[in-house]
Structures are given as structure tokens and as C-alpha cells.
Image (spheres, helix red, strand yellow):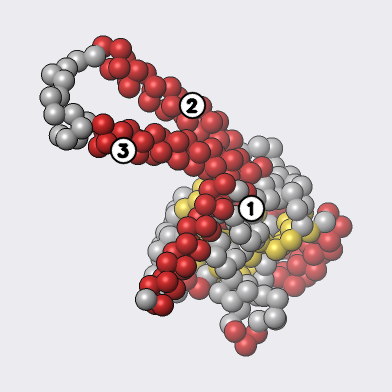
Amino acid sequence: MRAQMKLIALAAGRIALFMAAVLFPAAALAGTGQPSEWQLGFQGAVTPVMVDITWFHDFLLYIITAVTIFVLVLLVVVMVKFNARANPTPSKTTHNTLIEVIWTVVPVIILVAIAIPSFRLLFFQLNIPQADLTIKATGKQWFWSYAYPDNGGFEFDSLMLQDKDRKPDQPRLLAVDNEIVVPVNKTVRVQVTAADVIHAFAVPSFGVKIDAVPGRLNETWFKATKEGVYYGQCSELCGKDHAYMPITVRVVSDKDFATWIDQAKKKFASSADAPLALAEAAK
Ligand SMILES: [Cu+2]
């Protein structure tokens, strides 16, 4: 009995959590930049694209909740009013023009109402605006390499931090040795490709997820509106260490970005991984 009560209490807790997520989707226990415990919704949005994705998700949730409740109510009404006991002599009606027009037109209206913001969002994501900065991300088995062609063309590898190298504030399986650094409130174009197999570049708080395909250059963009550290992961099953090639983006002020660029140019210039920098130096 006590075990049953415990189970019921647990289930009630889960349902309450779910209802909270439905009623207050924006506050659905979500971390920003990284997942949080008991998170149900998306990670917090820090780019205009992710703000729109979150809005669209919530908008769809309201529609699907209304549709589901409406169908449930209809089912209950039919069961109660039209069962054999309550309604011994059923009507022989087979057609009703008005109701058929309604159940065709209303779903069409709902689909159009969904399609308009959906396409608007798709174009917003896929039209790369005039960029302030371009970085190139190359997926490799099993780490990422990043190049900054606008800033001297240096390139560096970014590997997941092992537990022994991690500082206390760096999350496990998400922190890397060399982070991507970008300025806040600047449009960043990301060119994404791969050197071996298909990977995918994804940062949930930015609303960015795009395949990294060998021999092809994909493009995406983000404009982070808040300084901070945002984590993502390779999101295309790419082999044995797929789970261990995270992405870390540090969003900083313009001044800090300029400082970082100066340091990075020196730090990564001598690297054998910087063919562009070497080519430029040879000029
Ligand atoms: Cu991968």
C-alpha cells in the first residue's frame, strides 16, 4: 500500500512538472547554454532564431493541446450519449453536408495558421544575413577544428576536456580545450564541413544544427545577444567517439574578442594546422 502511495505521489509529481511545462513553457526548468536537471523544454534562447523556434514550439503546443482536448471531449460525449443503453435506437444518418464542410475547412485553416510562421522561421534560419564575422567549423573523428578566415586565417583544434583537466565550473562531456570565441551582438556566419565522415554542428541555445558533410560547405548563422558560454555537441552519429566531440562557444564583448584574436593569432600561428596563416606569412 505504501509503495503504491509512493508511486502515485511520484506520478503526480511528474504530471505536475509536465503541466508546469505546458503552462509556462518559457520557464520550463531549462538551462541556458547547457542542459539542466529535469529540463523538459528547450535550452534558453540567446539568438533571434532560437527565440523564434521557442515561440513556434510553444505555439504548436497550444494548438495540439486544444486539438487533443477537443477530440477527447468528442469521444467522451459519444461514449456517454450514444452507447447502446443510453441510445437504443440509433439514427440512420450517413451524410451531413454542413459538418463535412466544417471538418474539412477547420483543419485547413489550422494547417495554414501553422504553415505561415513555419515558413517564415525557415527562411529566417536559411537566409544568411550580412555577416560581421565568418568562422569555419570542420568536423573530424572525433573533434572539431575552427578557422577564422577574417582574422588572419588561423586554425585550431578543439578537443573535449578529460575529467582530470576540467575546472569545477566546466561541465563534463561539454567543455573543450580551445573554445570558439565570438563577439556579442554580431552576426556570425558559420561555414560547416567535415574531413572524414558526416558530423553535425549543433548549439541548442543558438538554434543552430547543420550537417557537416565531407566535400560540401554548409552555412548557418547566429547572433548571440548575451555574453556567456554555450555548449553543443556533434549531432550526427559519426563513430565510436561521437559523444565526445562537444562544441563550446564563448560569447564576449568586442574588446575581449579583439584581445582574444591577438592572442589566438600568436598561439595558433605556429601550428601545423594553420595552412592559411602560414600561406599569409609566406607572402
Ligand atoms: Cu561527429
Instruction: Name the residue furthest right.
Output: 255
Q: Is residue 81 above or below residue 146?
A: above
Q: Amino acid at mark 3?
A: Val
Comparing labels 2 and 1, the label whose residue is closer to the camera? 1
Name the residue that disc number 3 marks.
76
Residue situated in front as seen by the camera: 151 or 95: 95
Give the left or right position of residue 240, taking residue 60 as reference.
left
Q: How many marks?
A: 3
Q: CA distance from mark 2 to mark 3?
A: 28 Å
Mark 1, other Cα within 10 Å: few <14 / some 14–19 / many ≥20: some
SS at mark 3 in the image:
helix
Q: Amino acid at mark 2?
A: Ala
Question: Is label 1's Cβ within 8 Å of ligand 1?
Answer: no
Name the residue that disc number 1 marks.
27
Residue situated in front as seen by the camera: 216 or 96: 96
Name the residue that disc number 2 marks.
113
Residue at coordinates 28% horizontally, 17% vertically from top-left?
100
